[in-house]
Amino acid sequence: MDGVRPGHGDAGADDVPAPRDGRWPVHALFQQPFSGDDALLKLATLRFAQMGVAAEVYADTPDQLDYVLRFAPSAGRLPVVHLNRGVNVLHERGRAVVAEFAGRFAGRVAGLVVHDQHDMAAQTGKLLAGLRDLNARLGAPGRPDGLPRVRRRP
């Protein structure tokens, strides 16, 4: 269960270089099911490490992500983070949230997932402009090394 290889046409197969060992990481949901119960997070950390699985986490706030990252397995693969489904990069407030997470967790996460919104399909021009703005902000001089940038598939 070390990894899988995407097939022809799978997401990411065309624009993401293959890992050196030829295997793609397997991610699994790493989440605290009950508030205040660190024992389950510690057990999950152990099981993820034993399986060689990378973490995929959900976080509504930077503080929440900071907390769960203390327990996330560090088996050589950084976790992927799903942001709150209410984050909408069509709007400045949503782009600011993404930029805050990206800046604070640069080098500590593999990527941030921003979920689609219903109004994005009807506003592709505004969406692309917003993503270009976010990309420029993330690549601004003085930002930490390793800061993720917005990727667009051709």
Image (tube, rainbow, N blue to C red):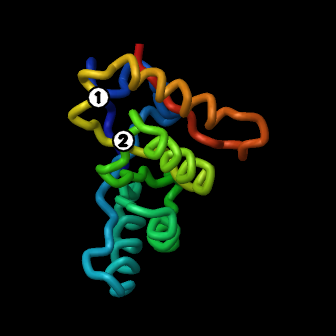
Q: Position of residue 18 (x, y in %)?
A: 46, 28
Between disc 2 and disc 1, whose residue precedes? 2
Question: Would you name the residue on which mark 2 appears?
Answer: 88
Rendering quarter of residue 140: top right
Compare residues 133 and 45 and report the one nearer the observer. Answer: 133
Q: Position of residue 56 (x, y in %)?
A: 36, 55
Judged left or right of residue 145, residue 69 is: left
Question: Would you name the residue on which mark 1 appears?
Answer: 120
Q: Residue furthest right?
A: 142
Q: Residue furthest top?
A: 154
Pointer 2 local density, CA inside 10 Å: few below 14, some 14–19, many at least 20: many
- Note whether residue 66 is visible: yes
- Note whether residue 7 is visible: no
- Mark 2 and mark 1 in contact? Answer it, CB < 8 Å: yes
Q: Which amino acid type is marked by label 1?
A: Met
Where disc 2 sits, the SS reads loop
Compare residues 28 and 97 and report the one nearer the observer. Answer: 97
Judged left or right of residue 124, residue 94 is: right
CA separation in Å, label 2 and label 1: 9 Å
Compare residues 17 and 102 and report the one nearer the observer. Answer: 102
Q: Position of residue 123 (x, y in %)?
A: 31, 22
Q: Residue at x 54, y 33 (%)?
A: 134
Q: Residue at x 33, y 19 (%)?
A: 124
Q: Residue at x 57, y 39 (%)?
A: 148
Q: Which amino acid type is marked by label 2?
A: Asn
Where disc 1 sits, the SS reads helix
Pointer 1 local density, CA inside 10 Å: few below 14, some 14–19, many at least 20: some
- The quarter of the rendered structure image containing the C terminus is top left
Labelled disc at residue 46: none
Compare residues 45 and 131 and report the one nearer the observer. Answer: 131
